[in-house]
Amino acid sequence: MGHFVATVVEFARAHENLAYVLAFLFAMSEALPVFGAFVPGSGAIIGLSALVATGALHLWPLIVWTTLGAISGDGLSYWVGHRYHREIVGRWPLNRYPEVIARGDALIKRHGGKSVFIARFTPGVRAIVPLIAGILRMSPARFYSMNLLSAVLWAPSHVLAGALIGASLTLLGAVAGRLAIFLVVLAIILWAIVWMLRRAWRYLPSLVIGARARFWAWAGAKDTWIRRRILWVLDPTRTELPALAISGAMLLGCLWAFFAILENVVAGGPLVRADAAVFEFLQTLRTDWGDQLMVAITELGDGIVTIAVAFAVLIWFAWHRAWRTALYWLAAVASAMLLTLIVKVTLHQPKTTEIYLALDLFSLPGSHITLSTALYGFLTMLVTREVAPRWQLLGAAVTAIFVSSIALSRLYLGAQWLSDVFAALAFGAAWTVLLSIAYLRRDPPTINAGGLCAVVGTTLALVGWFHVDRSHATDMARYAIHEERRTMTAADWWQDGWVNLPTRRFDLGGELEELLTLQWAGDLTNLQNALLTNGWQLPVSWGLQSSLAWLTPHVTLDQLPVLPRLLNGRREGLVLVHSLSKDDRPLRMVLHAWRANVDLRDGSGPVTPLWIGTVAIERTESLMSLITLTREQPDFNTPRDTVAAALPARRLVRRQNLQSDATWDGYVLLGRGLDFPSQSR
């Protein structure tokens, strides 16, 4: 068997495209009845995956082909069982393995649809459960959902394991002990979580019932207004009490989140800096197909679509004479719009881009998201209270995915700040929960959940399709990338314009990080070449082997890749390292440079790019003798001066009104390349 796997691997090394087909076939064959028990599919896939480290095969295509093969194999086996029923197990070769058939049959009868997932990772029944599932007439929806989920986990686990082995057997041996410790710790944590959840599930209901009985007895001892209200809430005949309790906790959480965001925005806290960082970062990820998809999703949250859905639901309630429900529905939609408008006018928080008119120029909270959250959230409450528990979770998940997609589209298109999205979700959810509590207190009537879902789905599909078809071209231009860049002359920057650039880097969370002690005007290649000739080097690139180095004992700094940094959401344009030692400790200097949001232009001449960077010193630390970490040293002067010594055209300038210390003396290094405008030199 080992010789067979080695032969397959050697064939794959010489024929890359056919190797992916082999991965598909081996993954599929493992699911075929009887035949799968004799085909070393897992071993062959792991062997093929080991070639990823050599560059002969690529990771993601291999994962995709293996996943498709696993899905196809189970699907084919299920179809055979569904087509030929019990008679198939009486034929050769299945009739020679009755004990395997019995095990697969028992597994399905015990676990139902979950057996398809379990069997994927269970030798012995792996190749028979899909067939038995088809014979027992398991529903296609249940089978294929488990088939897809298990394949998505099974295929990467095999491919990544093989890729790690191929990366470096020596390195893998060095970190094997640490990996084992991580797995043990992870298993203990998961076991503790499961144990606590099971204990809570077993004892929490009795604790709640006991507390309810004690409060009931206390409230019945005297006749006061407050105690009468408590008796009404704790009435054992009120079956909606658990839902009201959960809703109350959600209301408090949403209100706390909304006012915390509001306070952070008004005070100009880290969330405001995170707004700009996330905005810039997402704009760097935009693609044509991504824009097409996200514009279509955000159009489904436009007013014309949500109002159409709201009117359709209102007509449904009127048709069924559910007048009280109709009034609450109007309150959920109209009041959400009105309250959003009041908050917008009060705060005057500007939007990310000026693509809106009148009051819609103000951002927090976002109207799209607030209205969608309130409308579909209240609708979900109305529907899920009338369906079985298993459908309640599905309804809540569908609503959460839909509303989250609209929120993500607003972020991706740069139409809302991150704080707008969070505030809108919290505000819309709080208003929905508040109305839901009021609605559930009145013993509401049934509303025919199935018919209401059909009305909403039909309206959303028809009006949404019409709106997207009519407005998509216009909205694509409307939501196009609007890059806001400032300009200044090269002479102004060299003289004193440099002071307008930021002093510190901040990350996606808005937290202030390293000092920005370097500014460079010109082609970044000139800076790179100047430093490479003076002892600087390109860092180790990220890969499987270099990633495992963080778990390797006694690793040196030149074996570790540099952790990426973002400046206002933008990725680095250049990263260089330089080894040094201090007090007999191995250290390295790391330079990160990002494109600034300022360009240099003299008149009608060409644009000279401006870069801003940080240069810091790193050393290694060991966390519990398991993980190697890098930590920055409190010295920004030495690495800056090292860079300055390598630049022919440079200038040290000091920021005023800054208290210098041993960490930083307040000086910023200005450098310029060969393409710096000659008249500004």
Image (cartoon, grey):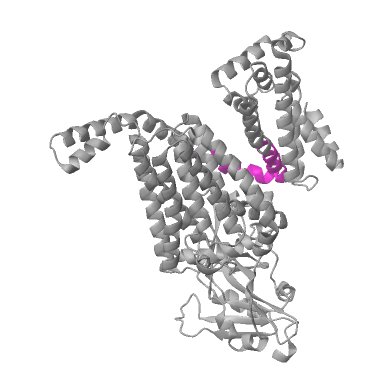
Q: Nearer the viewer, residue 351 or 13?
A: 351
Magenta span main SS: helix
Looking at the figure, which quarter contains the N terminus?
top right
- Indicate the position of residue 8 as horizontal and vertical percent values: 82, 33
- Indicate the position of residue 205 as horizontal and vertical percent values: 33, 30
Q: Is residue 263 visible?
A: yes
View extreme (left): residue: 222
In this rendering, is residue 29 above or below 185? above
- Indicate the position of residue 312 as horizontal and vertical percent values: 53, 44
Q: Picture quarter containing residue 290?
A: bottom right
- Indicate the position of residue 509 as horizontal and vertical percent values: 51, 61
Q: Picture quarter containing residue 95?
A: top right
Q: Residue at x 57, y 53 (%)?
A: 304
Whether residue 181 appears in magenta in the rendering, the answer is: yes
Q: Residue at x 26, y 32 (%)?
A: 235
Whether residue 242 appears in magenta in the rendering, the answer is: no
Q: Residue at x 62, y 85 (%)?
A: 493
Q: Picture quarter containing residue 573?
A: bottom right
Image label count: 0
Q: Is residue 624 visible?
A: no
Q: Residue at x 75, y 38 (%)?
A: 65
Q: Which residues are magenta?
A: 157-186
- Left or right, 212 with respect to 325, comes to left
Looking at the figure, which quarter contains the C terminus?
bottom right
